[in-house]
Amino acid sequence: MSVDIILAEELLPGYSIKRGSIKDRAMLLRFMHLTYQDMFPTQDFSHLAHTVEQYLSDNTPLWWVEEEDNQRRGHGNKDEDISPPLPLPRSSTVLVGCLWMGNAIDQVTGDRHAHIFLLYVVPEYRRRGIGTALMHYAEAWAKNRGDRQIGLQVFPSNQAALNLYNQLGYQTQSFWMLKPLYPQA
């Protein structure tokens, strides 16, 4: 019988980060839904289950940010209209962020590089440095495995994310352009 030992390390004071596994598909899917529903609240995102099924593997690491117990006491306001932190099943652990990494190939150089599939922080926990800390974590992971660059996709309407990435030195390399071929229903 094998036992998976998941070690958590401090990400920021009051928050720890731990490696997820392919067993976390349902929670990753929940975070993905939250991410896209922030920007497109009326859209159906049931297709994301296929994305997670197809791409989550041991080669696409997933990390969870947990709030330490002493930070949670007395936190939050019942009258605020915000998303609550997400509890893990059968656990008192509260997840407040997620980072999912993958691989991409630079189409100019042919080099493999790290790609951020998902970075999400629960709205109640934003503007506390968690997103920045996750980006630094992603960069350290990519450097450690020998990558010379890291990429991501961001919607132009997501100004908060654009601001974060610009502050961290990310630059636009290309534009992804689409043309609808059929009228929208």
Image (cartoon, rainbow, N blue to C red):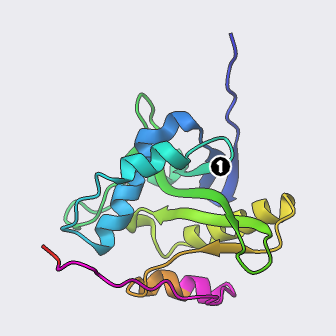
Q: Which residues are magenta?
A: 164-183
Q: Is residue 42 above or below residue 7?
A: below
Judge left or right: residue 74 versus residue 46: right
Q: Residues within 10 Å of mark 1 (few under 14, many from 20)?
A: some
Asked if residue 179 lies in the magenta stretch, the reply is: yes
Quadrant of the rendering where the C terminus is positioned: bottom left
Query: Residue placed at 37% from the left, 53% from the top?
Result: 48
Residue drawn at x 59%, y 38% is: 21
Residue at point 35%, 66% (across, down): 36
Q: Is residue 154 above or below residue 9?
A: below
Residue 73 appears in view: no
Magenta run includes residue 174 = yes
Identify the residue at image location x=38%, y=47%.
49
Where's residue 1, x and y in %? 68, 9
Which quadrant of the view contains residue 137?
Answer: bottom right
Residue 94 pos. (x, y %)? 45, 46
Mark 1 residue type = Pro
Please name the residue that numbered disc 1 is placed on.
61
Is residue 105 something that shows in the picture?
yes
User: The residue tagged with tag 1: helix, strand or loop?
Assistant: loop
4 or 95, which lies in front? 4
* Horizontal relation, residue 89 to residue 147: left or right: left
User: Percent position (x, y) of residue 174?
Assistant: 59, 88
Q: In this image, 81 relative to 171: left or right? A: left
Q: Residue furthest left?
A: 185
